[in-house]
Image: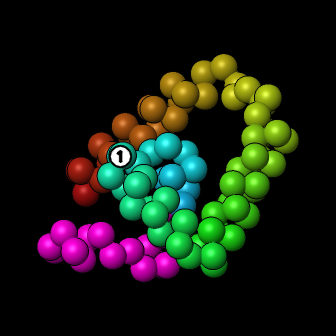
Amino acid sequence: MNDDQFEQLDCSAVVADIWLLLDNECDAGARTRLQGHLDGCPSCFEHYGIQRELKALISRKCGGDAAPEGLRERLRLEIRRSVTIRRTL
């Protein structure tokens, strides 16, 4: 894939990556490309706004909930167990 193709983002690619942008899970280059597309595409910008508001609502309503003690370790053990089982099959 050449740089021109990489720079040309279609709406489906932007919509698929909106949560990466909202969660700050993309690198600076991807952030710039996504933001550039959002700045020039009213439809994607509207979708971004809806997702941003949804994320804020979820944070307000669920942000104070704490996971039960030990959940992280139980999840870690289950993941290891399922990986081990899969490798032996």
How many residues crowd around disc 1 within 10 Å: few (fewer than 14), some, or many (20 or more)? Answer: few
Could you say which is closer to the camera, residue 65 or residue 47?
47
Identify the secondary structure beneath mark 1: loop
Quarter of the rendering occupied by the N terminus:
bottom left
* Residue 25 location (% of width, % of height): 45, 45
Residue 71 lies in magenta, yes or no?
A: no
User: Hey, which quadrant is residue 30 in on the image?
Assistant: bottom left
Q: Which residue corresponds to the image point at 51% horizontal and 52% vertical from the top-left?
A: 21
Give the labeled residue for mark 1.
Answer: 27
Tell me if residue 50 comes above or below residue 55 in the rendering.
Answer: below
Horizontal relation, residue 50 to residue 86: left or right: right
User: Hey, which quadrant is residue 50 in on the image?
Assistant: bottom right
Q: Which residues are magenta?
A: 1-17
Q: Is residue 56 visible?
A: yes
Tag 1: amino acid: Asp
Q: Which residue corresponds to the image point at 69% horizontal and 54% vertical from the top-left?
A: 52
* Residue 87 location (% of width, % of height): 24, 50
The coloring applied to the image is rainbow
* Residue 22 location (% of width, % of height): 57, 50
Residue 11 lies in magenta, yes or no?
A: yes
Q: Is residue 15 visible?
A: no
